[in-house]
Amino acid sequence: MRYLLQSEKADDSRKSHAGIEEEMSGKSLNSSPKGMVVEDQISGRSNISSCIDKLQPENASNEGIPSSLELSTIHIVEVGIAQRCSEATNKDEASSKSSVPKSCTISLPDFSILSGEIRLDNFSIRELQEAFRATFGRQTSVKDKLWLKRRIAMGLTNSSHVPDTDFVIKDNKIVLNEEENRKLQPTQAGSGSSLDMHVINASPKNLETTMIGAISDEQVSAKRLKTPSSKDNSKDDYYQIEKFVVKRMRKPTKRYIEELSEHEDMECAVKSYSCSKNLEHVYSPSKSSWAIGDVDFPNRIFSARYIPPAGFKFQVPFVLRARRCRPRKDFSVFTKYQSSGLCPTVEASTMTPVQEESGSGSGSRSREISSVAVQSSIAEEGMKVDNGTFNCEEKTDVEHGKLDDHGNSFPVNTNTQPAEPKSSERRKHHRAWTLCEVQKLVDGVAKYGAGRWSEIRRLAFASYSYRTPVDLKDKWRNLLRASLSQCSIEKGERNSRKYTSVPIPTPILSQVRELAELHAQAGLKLGTKKSTDNEGRAGVHEEGSGFL
DNA sequence: CTTAGGG
DNA sequence: CCCTAAG
């Protein structure tokens, strides 16, 4: 009942606003969802009656009903149909205008009005309404000529492509006035064949589908015409209308919406990269822009997923992705820069690593992808480390790659590509410690003291941007263990290098040990230790290098 | 942010 | 190597 009232009110407010309606109807049609295919399987008018009688979608012959849509919306559609029908019936009775059915429903279309060559331009509004009624089996109170014209034309010709110019409908085909021969759209009426995209099958024989479309559009039209101040428009009304509008659009799956949100999220991320720290709060919920049609996902890999439920086929974008959680903020940046070869501060990523960031940047905690090919045998190379000073230089690094302008090592990505990106997504690609690095570490500890990892990193590991202070610390810890372990097993087998991928020469280990002892004795007074440490270091280092 | 320590 | 608690 409520629907009826609302509809009537809507009708009342439907003053003719030809321009708007035209625009509206045209728009709603021309921008019809691209992924939507309406199957043409409805057999006839009788379906409508039964459909309306039951108000349920499960009519045997209702194959054309968009049963793939959500149930809630289906109900709304059904109610809408019923409403329309009763409305039409009421009006029929009131105006005693035309034929037939009382039981529930709609008057039978009077096809006589549609026979022969139809020139809708010559129709009056009343005639157009009549034609509409004949076409769609229901009455309309829309007084917009253009709207009616287009509606009818679409209904008769099965086509959503109705020219703006004058035309004549002949044999279910639209014929332009100017060019009589030019057919805009082949007819498929009654053929039962499926339609192409963009085509809403709307012949008089396929009323249901058409009606749904027509209703929604009409409601849209009504909505457009309603004055904003109209108190009649309850939210429900708008909701209904929106529902109908939505109906015509591609059904957004949950996933689709999700993807869209993420997409927008990504856009935000890209935009606000500089201040990406607050990214968590920049999330912007998706607007209903999905209705517009295809959305462009610039950085996504697409495939299409077909959902072919009864009578409907939706083509929904289906995004392949490894993870469903919020995209890492670095990810977007990564994709953005991927092509350019720059790779700023990228954490371990699902994607293929490119090049290591050169940013020895102070602030950036460069946990970049280091896709260096795992170097295996640097042992012998490392053996010829220079004495004491830190210029064992990048010999080992040359193995990894070349140095960039800043002297940072740039891994040569010969074959990189971790086989399974997702397995250790988060994990920094393991980078074996070279002997050189170990040496530097030991020296650094000797020089600056254990525990001043940041300093060591900054001063001694300036060229090894991939080593974080924590790395140094960890490595030192491991070295200590190895050293102690080696110490304990000294006589036995000397395989005590479980903690390092690079064989650490015994001298270094003993050096480590001594350093550790030294520091232990000093009681961690590193601050003052610096100078003394240096001196002590010299001797130690001498010892170490002597062995080397 | 830096360290230390556990995992 | 990662994570986290603690300065």
Image (tube, coloured by chain):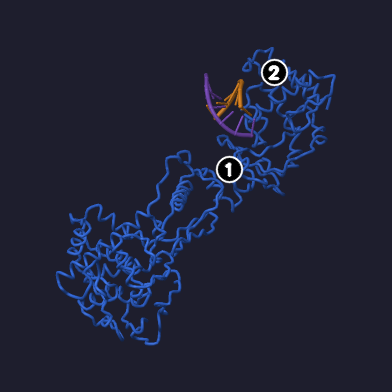
Chain colours: A blue, B orange, C purple
Horizontal placement of A336 versus A75: left or right? right
Q: Residue A539's spot in the image, x, y percent?
A: 77, 19
Secondary structure found at label 1: loop
Name the kind of residue labelled 1 in the image.
Val
Q: Is residue A11 above or below residue A280?
A: below
Horizontal placement of A35 versus A342: left or right? left
> Which of the numbered marks, if any, corresponds to residue A346?
1
Front residue of this view, candidates A10 and A354: A10
Placement of the N terminus of chain A among the 4 image quadrants: bottom left
Q: Nearer the viewer, mark 1 or mark 2?
A: 1
Residue at position x 63%, y 42% in the image: A423
Secondary structure found at label 2: helix
Q: Residue A490's spot in the image, x, y percent?
A: 82, 19
Name the kind of residue labelled 2 in the image.
Asp
- In this figure, which residue is indicated by the disc labeled 2? A533
The local crowd at label 1, few if under 14, some if 14 to 19, many if 20 or more residues have their Cα within 10 Å, is many
How far, Cα to Cα, is label 1 from label 2? Answer: 37 Å
Q: Residue A104's spot in the image, x, y percent?
A: 24, 66
